[in-house]
Amino acid sequence: MKLSVFLLLLCFESVLFGQQAERVMFYNVENLFDTYDNPLTRDDEFTPQGAKHWTKARYMMKLRKLAEVVDSVGGGRWPLMIGLAEVENRRVLEDFVGKTVLSGGDYGIVHRDSPDVRGIDVALLYRQKEVTMSESAFLRIPFPEDTTIRTRDVLYAKILFRQDTLHIFVCHFPSMVGGEKQSEWKRKRAASVVRHKVDSVFRRNPEAGIIVMGDLNGKADTPAQKVLGAKSSDKKIQTSELYNTGYYLLKKNHGSYRYKGNWQTIDHIIVSGGLIDGKSGCFAERRMTVFSAPFLLEEDKAYFGYKPCPTYRGPRYIGGVSDHLPVFIRLR
């Protein structure tokens, strides 16, 4: 009986989210650096004289390929919003939206340099004709016990989409360097910062429309996700809770990232119940899509199958787009 009801819901959503639905995407674009050396960050390898021999031609090629991905995800309609991770600065974002086919999307930019030691940040692009930016802020992740730890800020934006208010978070949680279990406490710290802000939004409006997207460097059932309080979106929906639209991908043989032959989804789009049940004014579909077009993949010769094709493999230039696949949900 429960399965039948759920299948009916999915059928209803397939009708509700037709071709005119807006798309919200997240993409870890893997080391989108310009070619200039910033003396304040560790970006030396991504310069013409650096270890990667990162030239203007390679930089522009990556921008064009990334723009092709965005165009393809849009399905003939520019995505309403694009959350990005691993962008170096505002310059690369301005080149991205101004010197590629994305110039037709009239995208606005929300960005600030973060304290990350490599100089990589998160950013939000939004279609200015459809979205009005009401407020934006960057939430610092504190590590008072070890001030040498510096990671990406969390981007928060309050927007007006037509007549409805949405609260957007773009995240790139600390990596697994040093071991997954040993570093989990850092991701839990980042998750607690997001959760604190989410709770403040819910206190003001229990039916608020909230979207948390990002590379959380962990699957949907990790301790950090439990700190976020993100549940499976296939469960019964409560308006003032968070739901991970990629939860259904756990233990599936596909995802947004592949490590040693194993697919996993570490890139997430989490929404409030008010977006799934429509009480916020907008509807979001309950299951995100991983965009896995063939031009983003290469053969995995070590473990068989296919994997995302990166720009570099070690010091060798491959010319791929990213080692992550983009994810998106549709919004009405």
Image (cartoon, helix red, strand yellow):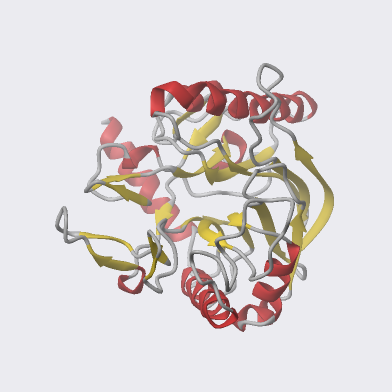
Q: Residue at x 45, y 35 (%)?
A: 177
Q: Is residue 268 left or right of residue 278?
A: left
Q: In the image, is residue 53 above or below residue 111?
A: below
Quadrant housing the C terminus: bottom right
Q: In the image, is residue 131 above or below residue 180?
A: below
Q: Residue at x 70, y 36 (%)?
A: 208
* Residue 84 appears in view: no
The answer to which quarter of the image holds residue 168 is top right
The foreground one among 171 and 158 is 171
The foreground one among 42 and 250 is 42
Q: How many marks?
A: 0
Quadrant housing the N terminus: top left
Residue 36, horizontal then vertical, whole percent: 68, 68
Q: In the image, is residue 187 above or below residue 44?
A: above
Q: Residue at x 51, y 72 (%)?
A: 53
* Residue 263 appears in view: yes
The foreground one among 288 and 84 is 84
